[in-house]
Image (tube, rainbow, N blue to C red):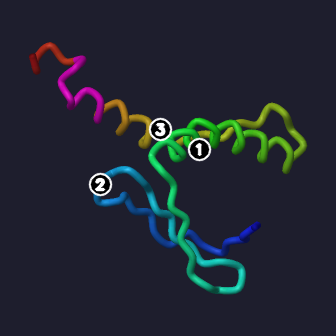
């Protein structure tokens, strides 16, 4: 089954943390949800960066194109890790 989407509407984590649900509106305007296990989401997260690069390169016919993540996003991830106290001598 192939589903074309118009919009991503929700992203939720299951109560037990074992799955993620992505809600969207399909091409006919009907709401739908896909549920992925934590393992499936992990595999998808590892696969998406390469797929995004390939899509950009194919769309624009330029093999040098790469998707750029906002520096703010990358900076926030670094802060999140240091807040855990693992890399900061002041925390432990």
The crowding category of the residue bearing disc 3, from other C-alpha atoms within 10 Å (few below 14, some 14 to 19, many at least 20), is: few
Q: Quadrant of the C terminus?
A: top left
Q: Residue at x 55, y 65 (%)?
A: 34
Which residue bears the numbered disc 1?
A: 44
| Image quadrant in which you'd find residue 78 | top left
Residue at the farthest right position = 61
Front-lying residue, 75 or 15: 15
Q: Quadrant of the N terminus?
A: bottom right
Instruction: Tell me the mark number nearer the camera, choosing from 2 and 3.
Output: 2
Q: Secondary structure at mark 1?
A: helix
Residue 22 lies left or right of residue 27; in this view the side is left
In the rendered image, the vertical position of residue 9 relative to residue 16, given as above or below: below
Which residue bears the numbered disc 2?
A: 16
CA–CA distance between discs 2 and 3?
Answer: 32 Å
CA–CA distance between discs 1 and 3?
Answer: 22 Å
Q: Position of residue 25 (x, y in %)?
A: 60, 78
Q: Which residues are magenta?
A: 80-87
Please tell me which of labels 2 and 1 falls first in the chain: 2
Which residue bears the numbered disc 3?
A: 71
Front-lying residue, 53 or 32: 32
Residue 67 lies left or right of residue 70; in this view the side is right
In the rendered image, the vertical position of residue 70 relative to residue 8, given as above or below: above
Q: Position of residue 87 (x, y in %)?
A: 24, 17
Q: Residue at x 29, y 29 (%)?
A: 81
Determine contact: label 1, label 3, CB under 8 Å: no
Q: Position of residue 19 (x, y in %)?
A: 42, 54
| Image quadrant in which you'd find residue 67 | top right
Q: Secondary structure at mark 2?
A: loop
| Image quadrant in which you'd find residue 91 | top left
């Amino acid at each position: 089954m192939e589903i074309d989407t118009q919009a991503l509407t929700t992203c939720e984590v299951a109560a037990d943390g074992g799955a993620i649900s992505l809600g969207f509106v399909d091409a006919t305007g009907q709401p739908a949800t896909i549920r992925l296990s934590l393992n499936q989401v992990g595999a998808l997260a590892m696969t998406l960066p390469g797929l995004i690069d390939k899509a950009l390169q194919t769309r624009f016919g330029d093999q040098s194109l790469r998707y750029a993540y906002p520096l703010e996003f990358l900076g926030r991830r670094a802060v999140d890790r240091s807040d855990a106290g693992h890399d900061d001598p002041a925390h432990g």
